[in-house]
Amino acid sequence: MNPFTDAELLEVLTGVSRSFVLTIRALPRALRRPVGLAYLLARASDTIADTASTPVDLRAESLRSFTGKLLHQRDDVFSLLPAIKPENPAEQYLLANLDRVITAVEALPEADRAEIVALLEKITRGQELDLLRFPDALEIRALETAADLNEYTYLVAGCVGEFWTRICAAHIPRYARLPAGDLGALGRSFGQGLQLVNILRDLPEDIAKGRCYLPIADLRPLGISHPADLRHNLLRAAPLFETWRRQALQHLEDARLYIEAIRPLRIRFACLIPWAIGIRTLNLLGQNSPLDHSTRLKVPRKEVTRIMRRALCATLSNTLIRKWSLEG
């Protein structure tokens, strides 16, 4: 079994990621492969979890089998995958070549492989929890509490910030100016902030699919006793939407502190790209709420290009990063 070459890895990443591949390309060569492979595994598990044409119980079992394969505890994931039929051709290709991705992960140094497996254990646990909480698109359900939402954003994204911090520090001496524990906490918040951006941006689409990530405990004081009420009038959730938008902004303020604390310029640049896109998306969500229209908000590709150019300069100066943060 031939593992992905570096060139193939970037090609597949380009197919399944619009923005994260920009971050991967900016990384030092020693980090591109472990981080890129970790992302492909996470994207594969996300595809398994999100393929709505496959019954929920089979998706959940496939996630457990996938994790079991990485842990060397099960070997049946490839017999389950044919039932997962994503519409996206790039995701189809990824699942068809998942054995090559896993082979490439197995060939990594043991420390890198162990970090990736530990990361995927958390991510797939969060995805399986999601399937259990939202099993049927026809019956809309909501998370119960803010703690549930914070748990979800940690399991599918906050742990990625921790992984990123540990693997970078392992490969790069004097990675940051902060102690490992403080930096890991900021990295966790960084990941949770980016996930909240996705949740807020995709709220109308998720509601249509039977998933309400806004906690019902916080919707009730707004007179919303059941998440199904939001299908008729999403604007009723506007105060709670704004609360979480501001929480996401606070997470991305932690992300700014993270970026300012790390030393390698290439990694600062790699982190600046998702941070700036996240900040811009949150500001657009504040100006043009998705609650009163159905068009999915995206930062235009031309603006992403401008962000990358500005990030090249900001990489060199914490003062420029702080100025950018204040401008939004």
Image (spheres, rainbow, N blue to C red):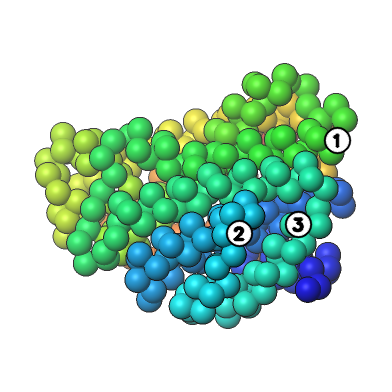
- Vertical relation: 62 (above or below) 241: below
- Vertical relation: 92 (above or below) 246: below
Q: Residue at x 47, y 48 (%)?
A: 125
The tally of labels here is 3
Determine which residue is flagged by label 3.
106
Determine which residue is flagged by label 2.
69
Quadrant for residue 97, please give it: bottom right
In which quadrant of the rendered image does the C terminus lie?
Answer: top right
Q: Circle 2: is it few (<14), some (14-19), or many (20+) Cα within 10 Å? A: some
- The three-letter code of the residue at mark 3 reads Glu
Determine which residue is flagged by label 1.
172
Is residue 43 visible in the rendered structure shown here? no
Q: Distance from label 2 to label 3 (Cα)?
A: 11 Å
**Earlier residue among tags 3 and 1:** 3
- Vertical relation: 44 (above or below) 126: below
In which quadrant of the rendered image does the N terminus lie?
Answer: bottom right
Q: Residue 18: x percent and y percent? A: 62, 64
- The three-letter code of the residue at mark 1 reads Ile
Q: Residue at x 28, y 36 (%)?
A: 145
Q: Residue 229: x percent and y percent? A: 15, 54
Q: Residue at x 58, y 72 (%)?
A: 78
Query: Pointers 1 and 2 in contact (CB under 8 A)?
Result: no
**Earlier residue among tags 1 and 2:** 2
